[in-house]
Image (spheres, helix red, strand yellow):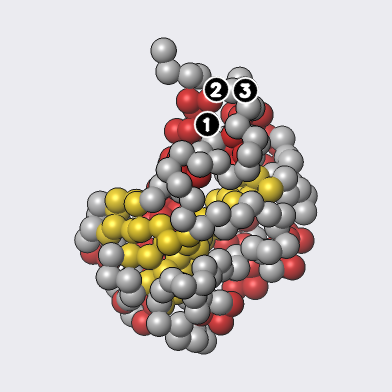
Amino acid sequence: MGGAATGAWLTGDSSAEPTRTPYTAGRTVWHSVPVDTLFPRTLKGTGAGPGGTNRNWTRLSVAPDSDCSKGLDPLLRTTLRSVGCERMVRATYTDSTRSAVTTVGMVVTEADAAGMQALSARFTEQKLAARKDLMPRTYAPEGTVAAGFGDRQRASWTVRPLTEIPVVVFAVSGFADARTVAEPQPADAATETPATTDIAQAGLGHEAKGIADRVERGLRTTVTDLVEPPA
């Protein structure tokens, strides 16, 4: 789906009718909402960089929708087994300097509200979002500055089970020059002040967090509109 045209759909099924609860609506977004709505061609990150600096991101490509085996390492898939994986969608962005690349994605789950709340509580209590062995995988579209963005290039990440919608939002960032990262750092730690690691000083925690924030915000707005269509 790389370079999908404006208004294109992740699959050919555009006939799904709007539903009336966040859970039923949220479970259909991967095939009933245009690509450019889920993953806008550009994202504006006012105040999203280190020290409140502005960031702007451009979408490089959108991956075909898939199961979770392509975007999640085995241990992360096991961790999410309790909520199931209906489908996964991903896209990769770069910043305006083309020095950083970030894959952002959504795991659409099969869980109900109780299941998502239990998963969220587990992530909080066990600090799972900070575990390096639970990092999401990258999506490295060929012919772009992210072509060398693989497992060893992962630098900072965030994984967020939502509770109002049956979705887990994630993002993982790295350097666009494909350098290997020996010690990845979770986005929450990499955005703390003062920044001391190379990852933090390069703003890669802000990249992962900022892009995930905006994709999550757009998803919430989309689901609200599906549940309560504008008059």
Q: Is residue 185 above or below residue 34?
A: below
Q: Residue at x 73, y 62 (%)?
A: 69
Instruction: Place residue 32 in its image quadrant.
Output: top right
Q: Amino acid at mark 1?
A: Val
**Label disc, if present, on residue 17 of the rendered structure:** 3
* Residue found at the far top of this picture: 231
**Label disc, if present, on residue 227 of the rendered structure:** 2
Q: Choose the circle earlier in sequence order: 1 or 3.
A: 3
How crowded pointer 2 is (Cα within 10 Å; few <14, some 14-19, many 20+) is rated as: some
How crowded pointer 1 is (Cα within 10 Å; few <14, some 14-19, many 20+) is rated as: many
* Callout 3–callout 2 Cβ contact below 8 Å: no
Please name whichever residue, 11 or 66, is drawn nearer the observer in this view of the structure: 11
Mark 3 to mark 2 CA distance (whole Å): 10 Å
Q: Is residue 21 above or below residue 137?
A: above
Say which quadrant the C terminus sits in.
top left
Mark 1 to mark 2 CA distance (whole Å): 6 Å
Mark 1 to mark 3 CA distance (whole Å): 13 Å
Circle 3 or circle 2, nearest the eye: 3
Q: Is residue 72 above or below residue 185?
A: above
Residue 130 appears in the rendering: no
**Label disc, if present, on residue 199 of the rendered structure:** none
Tell me the element at label 2: helix
- x and y, in percent, of residue 78 in the image: 76, 61
**Label disc, if present, on residue 223 of the rendered structure:** 1
* Callout 1–callout 2 Cβ contact below 8 Å: yes
Query: Is 66 displayed left or right of 57 in the figure?
Result: right
- x and y, in percent, of residue 170 in the image: 54, 56
Say which quadrant the N terminus sits in.
bottom right
Q: Choose the circle earlier in sequence order: 3 or 2.
A: 3
Query: Is 124 displayed left or right of 70 in the figure?
Result: left
Residue 44 appears in the rendering: yes
Q: Residue at x 40, y 82 (%)?
A: 177
